[in-house]
Image: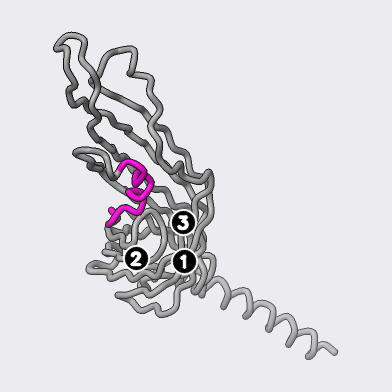
Amino acid sequence: MRRLSLLLFTFVVVSFITKDVQADKFRYYWDTKSHDKGQLHFSYGYGFPRLDNRRFKLHKDENAYKVDGVGPFIFKAEYGLTRQLSIGLSATYVQYTSEWEQQRFSEFHQKNLWFVYGTKVHDLAAMLRLNYHWVVTPRSDLYVGGGLGYNRWRSEDFTNFTPEDSTFNSFFKKPDPFAAEITLGYRYYFRQRNAVFIEAGYGKSIVQAGFVFKFLHRKRQ
């Protein structure tokens, strides 16, 4: 009985020591893989082409029609739940302007003239995202991910016609109040904690690319 108790006690002690050694080993070698449990990844990038241009197609037949803007700018924070699964936040910002010309009668010139009309839109989306990491090596990370969240937009109409016409309402397809994305991505670490990434799929753009910075979620003991 004493031998059995001693054997059980030894087993418990060895288990705790092994567990602590493995934890300490992970804390020390936490950045040997491009993705692992407990890692934090911060990313920023840019997308192309913008998929929101289609919202202004109701004005595409107007004179001198054009759409300009910047974005989407992409910001992401990701935490490794396991060696295959991670959870994070994804945010995108897009600003674009649609312009066209319409003829109006000018009282001052007593004739029809072309005047500029347009709409400026600010589009911000925030999503909760999950990634599944298929192939992970010290230098590369192939993953697929998707997210759902909230889409907030604000539009401003403008014109250089008479002031009484400055409150006109433009017509364009308003975005939905929710945001979604699903992409296939790849990261390459040119340094142990710095990478470039590229993703392709459905979102604010078809393709997005940028930089990744890797951290540990807690300080070493």
Q: Quadrant of residue 28 in the image?
A: bottom left
Q: Is residue 47 magenta?
A: yes
Q: What residue is pinned by disc 3? A: 217
Q: Is residue 161 above or below residue 93?
A: above
Identify the secondary structure beneath mark 1. Answer: strand
Sequence-wise, which precedes: disc 3 or disc 1?
1
Q: At 22% from the left edge and 69% from the top edge, which residue is drawn?
A: 190
Q: Closest to the observer: 52 or 28?
A: 52
Q: Quadrant of residue 1 in the image?
A: bottom right
Q: What residue is pinned by disc 1? A: 145
**Amino acid at circle 1:** Gly
**Amino acid at circle 3:** His
Residue extent of the magenta highlight: 46-59
Q: What residue is pinned by disc 2? A: 199
Identify the secondary structure beneath mark 3. Answer: loop
Sequence-wise, which precedes: disc 2 or disc 1?
1
